Amino acid sequence: MVELGVAEGASAVGVLEVMDPGGTLHLVDPYHLSRVPALNFMRRAAHRAVSANGGAKVVWLENFSYEVARDWSAPIDFLFIDGDHQEEAVERDWKQWSGFLEADGVAAFHDARVFPGGWTWPDYGPVRFVDRMFRKNSGSEWAILEEVDSLVFVRQRKRPGREPHQEC
């Protein structure tokens, strides 16, 4: 499993709670937005929260997702995209990482849906990307599997005689 954009680690803790304890969770975040880089409280909070939950093996990759993608080669069962929320950055993450998803793998986008009482809006980057790529694109090889609050989960459509999606 791979999470792009970890912040304080709350979603990583959630993933660890439900994933196979024999699996590996790769957490990708450059932690470059700290106001006090020498202390980097966001990174400290994430490491503390994640390490307190045990379970699966955790690999920290403290770099930008596009840098990590250049050297990535392992298949992915679950991809969580929650990094830079500009539409172009969400699209770049999708293009660079979706090709590593297993044929039955699932990708999740955070802050990608407008919902009652929520904080997202129609012009928000992840919302625009998901709308354009999956909601309004009937020819997409990917379909929305489920939506919960701001989360949108997608999976590759099953098509007879087609090889799994590879965009690398």
Image (cartoon, grey):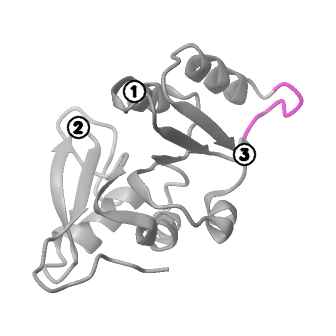
Q: How far apart are marks 2 and 1 (CA)?
A: 15 Å
Q: Nearer the viewer, residue 28 or 152?
A: 28
- Tally of numbered tags: 3
Q: Residue furthest front?
A: 22
- Identify residue for label 2: 149
35 drawn magenta: yes
Spot occupied by residue 148 in the image (x, y as percentages of width and height): 20, 39
Tell me if residue 91 is in the magenta stretch. Answer: no
The disc labelled 3 sits on which kind of residue? Glu
Q: Position of residue 10 (x, y in %)?
A: 48, 26
Residue labelled with disc 1: 14
Is the residue marked by circle 3 packed among few (<14), some (14-19), or many (20+) residues within 10 Å? Answer: some
Q: Element at badge 3?
A: loop
Q: Which residue lies furthest to the left in this view?
A: 160
Point out the tag, 3 or 2, that comes first from the N-terminus: 3
Q: What stretch is highlighted in magenta?
A: 32-39
Binning the other alpha carbons within 10 Å of mark 1 as few (below 14), some (14 to 19) or many (20 upward) gives few
Q: Which of marks 2 and 1 is nearer the N terminus?
A: 1
Pinpoint residue 130: horizontal percent, then vertical percent. 29, 63
Residue that protrudes farthest toward the top in the picture? 52
Q: Residue at x 46, y 63 (%)?
A: 90
Q: What element carries label 2?
A: loop
Residue 14 visible in the picture: yes
Q: Is residue 44 above or below residue 167?
A: above
Q: How far apart are marks 3 and 2 (CA)?
A: 28 Å
- Residue 32 drawn above or below residue 136: above
**Residue designated by label 3:** 62
In the rendered image, residue 6, in percent from the top left (x then y), is placed at 56, 38
Magenta-colored segment: predominant secondary structure: loop
Could one spot residue 124 in this view of the protein? no
At a point 67% along the width and 40% down the height, the residue shown is 60
Label 2 crowd (10 A; few <14 / some 14-19 / many >=20): some
